[in-house]
Amino acid sequence: MAVVVLGLDILTKYLVVAHLEHRDPIRLLGGGLLLAVSRNSGAAFSFAQGATILFTGVAVAVIVVIVRTARRLGSAGWAVSLGLLLGGAMGNLVDRIFRAPGPGRGAVVDFIDFRVWPVFNLADSAIVVGGLLAVLLSMRGVELDGTRKVEPPDPA
């Protein structure tokens, strides 16, 4: 899952930069969706623009934690969730490492603009979906190893 997300994220960013940089946005869905290059040196929703190096470090830490956690996986749902999170984190980390202005300080390429939500990319989408799936699995009591958390009986 992570490899698919990473590959699609890199491909779409490459295509968007190659074909849309310095051009008018492509308008879809009656103008409700714009495809246009936007650079984000901060976190989600362009938060903390000056802290790019910090977010690079956070992304590396998240990737290490997910890779270490993956050894305990026995649940297909958790595998998908962590794969989406890992692929999304790696996709945006690739931008931070390889894009201008330099390693660890690069701006992430965003290009999906629904006009009522901050501009985002496929990596961001994978992170959000993976996070929501993790919350759902946790709420249902599904453990990483695939077992279900057993609640103690109510003493009343």
Image (cartoon, rainbow, N blue to C red):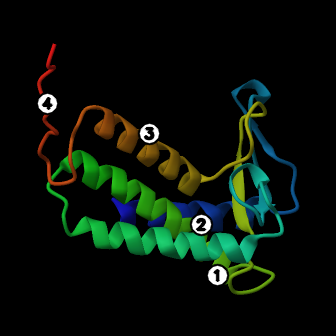
User: Marks 3 and 1, Cα distance to the nearest angstrom?
Assistant: 27 Å
Along the viewing direction, whichever of 65 and 132 lies nearer the viewer: 65
Q: Give the residue type at disc 3.
A: Leu
Q: Are marks 4 and 2 in contact (CB under 8 Å)?
A: no
Within 10 Å of disc 1 (Cα), the crowding (few <14, some 14-19, many 20+) is some
| Quadrant containing the C terminus in the rendered view | top left
Q: Is residue 25 above or below residue 70?
A: above
Within 10 Å of disc 2 (Cα), the crowding (few <14, some 14-19, many 20+) is many
Along the viewing direction, whichever of 154 and 18 lies nearer the viewer: 154
Residue at the extreme top of the image, as rendered: 156
Per the image, the residue denoted by label 1 is 97
Q: Is residue 140 left or right of residue 108?
A: left
User: Marks 1 and 2, Cα distance to the nearest angstrom?
Assistant: 9 Å
Q: Position of residue 64 (x, y in %)?
A: 41, 75
Q: Earlier in the sequence, mark 4 or mark 2?
A: 2
Give the residue at x 63% y 75%. 56
| Quadrant containing the N terminus in the rendered view | bottom left
Which circle, 3 or 4, is nearer the viewer? 4
User: Marks 3 and 4, Cα distance to the nearest angstrom?
Assistant: 26 Å
Q: Position of residue 104 (x, y in %)?
A: 68, 82
Q: Give the residue type at disc 4.
A: Pro
Q: Give the residue type at disc 1.
A: Ile
Q: Secondary structure at mark 1?
A: helix
